[in-house]
Structure formats: structure tokens, C-alpha cells
Image: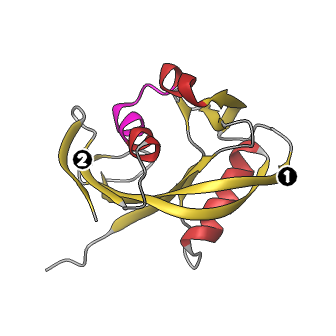
Amino acid sequence: MQMPVHIVAAGGFVENDKGEILLVKTRRGGHWVFPGGQVEVGENLIDGLVREVKEESGIDVEVSHLVGVFSNTATYPGHSGVKTVPTKVMFDFVCEPKGGELATSDETSDSRWVRKEEVLDMVLAPALRTRYQAYLGYDGSIHYMDYVTKPQFELKLDRKI
């Protein structure tokens, strides 16, 4: 049996005191997303998320609490020498901005604060929309979802734990 390989990532729902949500626009694909990304070797989830938010948006954050755990169990051909993209496990946290200035990076072409009710007008990817809706419906229970994104988005499991 081959040892399993997973990508571990963390995402941040950063909300300011005006009730606005931080979004960044990716250079690759040009889509609006929540800041976050893969946790590096030897890095914990929270440090990885703080680093990713700062790198992608210029904003310093403090991680508040976990709202969801998500598995993208689709495997598909990768790029840049990656034969197969493995299962991804993502942890979404609520974050509070603590400083910094909106900026862009090698990965992002724009960053901005968006009114909470306008976020779904900008975030179009079905998986990200589903995760944002879980954030909006947070009631103290952690949301767990299993989905695939390719060949098309399919929600396979949705429960609270």
C-alpha cells in the first residue's frame, strides 16, 4: 500500500470592523478568492494562514476560530511536473485584521475589502461559494464537507461536527 499524500491548506475569512470581507484576485485565472493557501513543510496551520494572508493581501491578521474543514477528494492531472494532484484538506478560519496595508503579490493582482452581501457577486467558484456560505451560517459547530471540483463541482457530503 502506498502512503497517502494530501495537500494541507488554510483559508481565511478576514472581516474588518465595517463588516467587510477581504478578497484577493488571483493572477493565474483572474478569479476573486479568499486569502489562504498551502501550508509549508514544518509550518503549522495558523502560522501558514497568517503568512499566506500577508503575502497575498498585505494585511496582518490574528486567527480567531475554525469554522470549517473541507476535503476536495478529486484527483486530476497536475502541471509543472506534477503527475497527479492529490486530495486536498482545507481548514477555514475567521481572522481579524490587525494592521498592514492592502497590497498585491506575485500571486495576486488586486486586494480589496468587499461588503459581506456583495461577496457572492465576485466569488464565482462553486467550492469557494459553498465554503463562504458555511462561514455565513456558522453557529458554533464546525462545518465538514467533502466535494470534488473536477470535472465539475459536486458536493458529496455536508454535515456539522
Q: Nearer the viewer, residue 138 or 150?
A: 138
What is the spatial separation of the Cα atoms under label 2 and label 1, in whole angstroms? 34 Å
Which residue lies at the image location 72% right of the left edge and 31% below the top edge?
112
Q: Which numbered dot is residue 144?
A: none
In the rendered image of this protein, does residue 118 appear above or below residue 87? above
Query: Which quarter of the figure has residue 104?
Result: top right
Residue 97 magenta-highlighted: no
Q: Counting other residues with Cα less than 10 Å from the Cα at mark 2, is it few (<14), some (14-19), or many (20 or more)?
A: some
Specify whether 140 is left or right of 59. Answer: left
Dominant secondary structure of the magenta stretch? helix
Residue 127 magenta-highlighted: yes
What amino acid is at disc 2? Tyr
Which residue lies at the image location 55% right of the left edge and 64% below the top edge?
65
Q: Nearer the viewer, residue 59 or 97?
A: 97
Identify the residue at the far left of this view: 1
- Which segment is the magenta one? 123-130
Total count of labels: 2
Image quarter of the C terminus? bottom left
What amino acid is at disc 1? Gly
Q: Secondary structure at mark 2?
A: strand
Residue 67 horizontal/vertical position (percent): 45, 57
Image quarter of the N terminus? bottom left
Q: Counting other residues with Cα less than 10 Å from the Cα at mark 1, is it few (<14), some (14-19), or many (20 or more)?
A: few
* Residue indicated by mark 1: 99
Which residue lies at the image location 56% right of the left edge and 22% below the top edge?
118
Residue 86 horizontal/vertical position (percent): 30, 58
* Residue indicated by mark 2: 147
In the rendered image of this protein, does residue 20 appear above or below residue 2? above
Residue 157 horizontal/vertical position (percent): 18, 51
Specify whether 155 is left or right of 68. Answer: left
Identify the residue at the far front of this view: 139
